[in-house]
Image (spheres, rainbow, N blue to C red):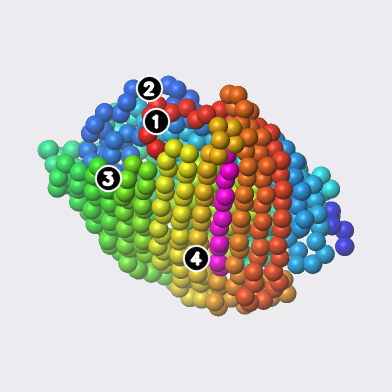
Amino acid sequence: MDMDTDLMGPTARKLKVRAQSLSIAFVLVAALASAVHAQVSPLGAGSSAGVSNNPAATPAPRASVLAYGVDAGVGESDNVTLAPTDKISQTIATTDVDFTVKDQSRLFDVNAAGRFAYLDYLQHAFRSQLTGRFDGEGRVAIVPGRLMWVVQDDFGQAAIDPYTAVTPANIENINYFSTGPDLFMRLGGLSFINLSARYARAQYQTSPYSSNRGSGILAVGRDVSASASVSLNADFERVMFENTVVNTDFDRTSGFGRYELHGARTDFEGDLGASRISQAPRIGQEGTSTSGPLAKVKLSRRLSAAAKLTLIAGRELTDAASSFSTLQTGAIGAGGMIGAGGMIGAGGMIGSAPAALTSDNYTSNYGSIGWEYLRNRTAIALAARWERDTYSGQPQLNVNRPVADIDIHRQLTRAFSAQLLGRFYKTDYPNAAIASNTGSSNYGDWLVESALTWRHGRGLEIRLRYDHSSHEVSAGGSGYSENRVFLTVGYRPRSMTESTEPL
């Protein structure tokens, strides 16, 4: 079998599409970066910036941050195709870029982070590949404190086949773009009405799940104290697919009550209500509807000047595109950017999201806990998440996903620093029937990365990194492992902030 022909073909067809998908992310980054430097005045108390139902209870503005880095280098893999046997070694050239932009002002609110790696497989096991994740949101005040225009974009990769190894031949680009206005209105001194409208576009490179979406949110509430509010919320979304042969358009309607508390050290948000999915009829069939409870809780507590604890739990009806746009990134990655597992990029861990096997809605039950510690020369982040997705009428797609992350960074001396990253990611499709001999429905992935970095002058950085990944199989298929070593040289100036407080 010709390795070059077999593995390069699918990836080659994706390169042109990748460039189009990435353009949205890069255009948004440029706009966000311009906004950061356009306004420098602090956001006043009581502004309606942010997503809180009670703008007056919004926490104090965060410090402005502009951090970025670029590097290039070369590395070696001992099993680039992630094969159980007959491993193929490969020399890989890499160019990496990452950035974090955060800023609040009277007219602009910007929060964006991204990480990208361009990999060139020098012995041609795969075509050259650009991989990465970008999440960004920009808010422009048309009428400060009352009317804002919001632009959001989420770009990344996802596996195509969830049962086989995540290589460049088994990933696709996904981009989720949304935009629309937020309107905040006060009724007297304590009551408020908030309105939001969005147009969204979910674009899949390979899977036939691309869609256009329109949504609206109405919130009617009242401040119960200077830092707390209660509200009743109605949320409607219309989803229209390009391919109506394999997909069915649907409406998703939710009604829920919300309680918010934003204190000096504690933030709490709780939603309780229900959702209803109404699917359009297919040819020769009647339309269907599904209802289910909606419950979400998010608690964030500043334990000390250096430590913070976050708890999240919930149950909701959702779909693959909506889940991708709100992907929880855990503890690992530049700017918090890592997906659900899979490939390790040259600049560090750059993950891929779970494969989308259907556009149908499913019930997601999830819970997570995260702990952060940032003090002087040491930074530690720990996170754990559990998720169970249940598909009505399609039990073969049901999946359980427990995940655990660790990220430890230590400044050893003025010039040297060390970092240790780790992730365990378990996937279990309890009812799946796998046709392929190489596929598996129950497996666990271990990802470990250690790095030693030397800095000199204003931003010169030399980094030696070792990555190890292993795939352990419990049902079907075969396991595999891979080791990679990279040496890179780059430029990373100190992050520019307006505050010395921990971020």
- Cα separation, mark 2 vs mark 3, equals 26 Å
Q: Which three-letter amino acid code belongs to the residue tagged 1?
A: Thr
Q: Which mark is residue 402?
A: 4
- Give the magenta-colored segment's residue range: 417-427
Q: Which mark is residue 10?
A: none
Secondary structure under badge 2? Answer: loop
- Cα separation, mark 4 vs mark 1, equals 35 Å
Q: Which three-letter amino acid code belongs to the residue tagged 4?
A: Pro
Give how far across and how far down residue 219 sits, in percent: 25, 48
Q: Count up the numbered dots.
A: 4
Tag nearer the camera, 3 or 1:
1
Dot placed on the residue nearer the N-terminal end, 3 or 4: 3
Query: 412 and 365: which one is in front?
Result: 412
Tag nearer the camera, 4 or 1:
1
User: Pointers 3 and 1 in contact (CB under 8 A)?
Assistant: no
424 in magenta: yes
Query: 501 and 203: which one is in front?
Result: 501
Q: Which mark is residue 500?
A: 1
- Cα separation, mark 2 vs mark 1, equals 17 Å
Secondary structure under badge 1? Answer: loop
Residue at the spot of label 3: 265
Secondary structure under badge 4? Answer: strand
Residue at the spot of label 2: 40
Tag nearer the camera, 2 or 4:
4
Q: Which three-letter amino acid code belongs to the residue tagged 2?
A: Val
Give how far across and how far down residue 7 sits, in percent: 78, 56
Dot placed on the residue nearer the N-terminal end, 2 or 4: 2
Q: Is residue 233 visible?
A: no
Dot placed on the residue nearer the N-terminal end, 2 or 3: 2
* Residue at x 37% of width, y 47% of height: 307
